[in-house]
Amino acid sequence: MSRVWLIVTGGVLVVLAAGAVQFLFPRTAASPVSIVFEPSPVENTGTTTPDIKKITVSSSARPASRLPSIAKGDTVTSWTFNGAYTGKADLITKAEAEIKRLSRLIGEGTYSNMSLHVGIANQYELLGDGERAYEYLSRAIGKNENSTSGLPWHNLGVLMERLGALETARMAYEESTLIQPEMKVYHYAYLEFLTTRVKDSAADIEKEYTAALKYLGQDSDILQLYAEWKQA
């Protein structure tokens, strides 16, 4: 199973189009007006705030997650990157209009503020503006009442990986799997990150592999990722 196929099928769910909320994972880009998924590029960056705590697998009754921050030792050298819309005037205009539209909906009660902030962050990711994407994902996490959705954490993991803040990305990916351990797309993304970006971190890989099997059973895609890492 390819990374793009899994993430596209999982969808990054948050573009509000014609009155419906749609969530999209940051490794994909979607048209702000229609439900169309396109793969989006990946790059790198970092900043500073209090640390994210390491969290281990626990029951579904979890305390509220801490707000995101750049992990100790991580550095973001540039917050800008080539987003899917970079250099495309018509798409830039479309994203800017979508940001304004979603911003007007905040606080109205039609959609959750968390999903709206994730949607805005996604538009900034399409524009290649990592700093604003980070800002809105941070707001989304702050609005994620009772930490019931792993989406903003997953998206933060993708963004931080793109920006080169790998320990921050690792923590965010892990958090998404802890909040919604039943979501295959989160486990797959986290295990793929570990086995490709920090492949020497055997303890983390074994821990996540065990957690994924616990919640997903003998999933063929998870088994394949793990087998490829063991053979490498």
Image: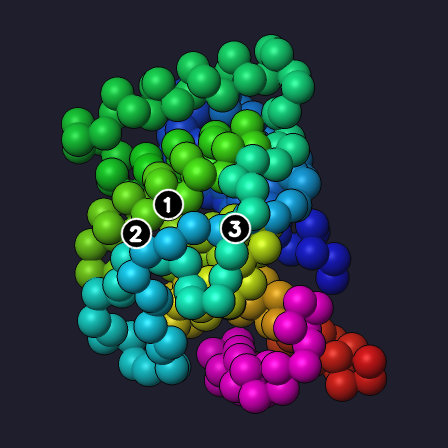
Give coordinates of residue 69: x percent, y percent: 36, 57
Q: Secondary structure at mark 3?
A: loop
Q: Around disc 2, counting alpha carbons within 10 Å, would you say few (fewer than 14), some (14 to 19), or many (20 or more)?
A: many
Q: Nearer the viewer, residue 122 or 181?
A: 122
The percent position of residue 202, horizontal first and vertical second, equals 63, 86
Q: Are marks 2 and 1 in contact (CB under 8 Å)?
A: yes
Quadrant of the rendering where the N terminus is positioned: bottom right
User: Reading the chain from its start, which is encountered first: label 3 or label 2?
Assistant: 3
Q: Which residue is mark 2?
A: 141
Let me know if residue 159 is in the magenta part.
Answer: no
| Image quarter of the C terminus | bottom right
Q: Which residues are magenta?
A: 195-216
Residue 13, x across and y down, in percent = 46, 43
For the residue pair 15 and 190, the one nearer the viewer reads as 190
Mark 1 residue type: Leu
Residue at mark 1: 137
Identify the residue under disc 3. 76
Amino acid beneath label 3: Val
